[in-house]
């Protein structure tokens, strides 16, 4: 699941099944938009490794789009 955005007291998560809203208090206070979160043992946590990998892949894709131009 990825945090898509915050709307007031709620976080909107993108899941495989679609978008889900949860109360922001259920997430770690350090959670940000774009973070990958997991749910286990009754709580949510940020997966820093998965978040870093998604951001790296997005940067690489953007770089390819910007540098691979048809001349």
Image (cartoon, rainbow, N blue to C red):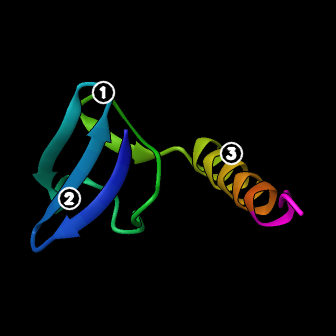
Would you identify the image quadrant in which residue 33 lies? Answer: bottom left
Q: Nearer the viewer, residue 41 or 23?
A: 23
Asked which secondary structure carries label 3, the reply is: helix
Secondary element at tag 1: loop
Q: Which residue is most to the bottom?
A: 8
According to the picture, the residue beneath numbered tag 1 turns out to be 41
Callout 3–callout 2 Cβ contact below 8 Å: no
Camera-side residue of 45 and 17: 17
> How many numbered discs, if any?
3
Residue 8, horizontal then vertical, whole percent: 10, 74
Which SS class for mark 2? strand
Residue at the spot of label 3: 53
44 vs 62, nearest the viewer: 62
Q: Is residue 54 left or right of residue 61?
A: left
Q: Residue 71 in the image: x percent, y percent?
A: 89, 63
Which of the two discs, 1 and 2, labels the residue nearer the N terminus?
Answer: 2
């Amino acid at each position: 699941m990825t945090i898509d955005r915050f709307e007031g007291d709620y976080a909107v998560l993108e899941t495989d099944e679609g978008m889900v809203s949860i109360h922001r208090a259920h997430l770690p206070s350090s959670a940000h938009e774009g973070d990958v979160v997991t749910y286990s043992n009754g709580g949510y946590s940020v997966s820093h490794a998965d978040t870093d990998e998604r951001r790296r892949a997005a940067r690489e894709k953007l770089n390819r789009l910007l540098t691979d131009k048809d001349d």
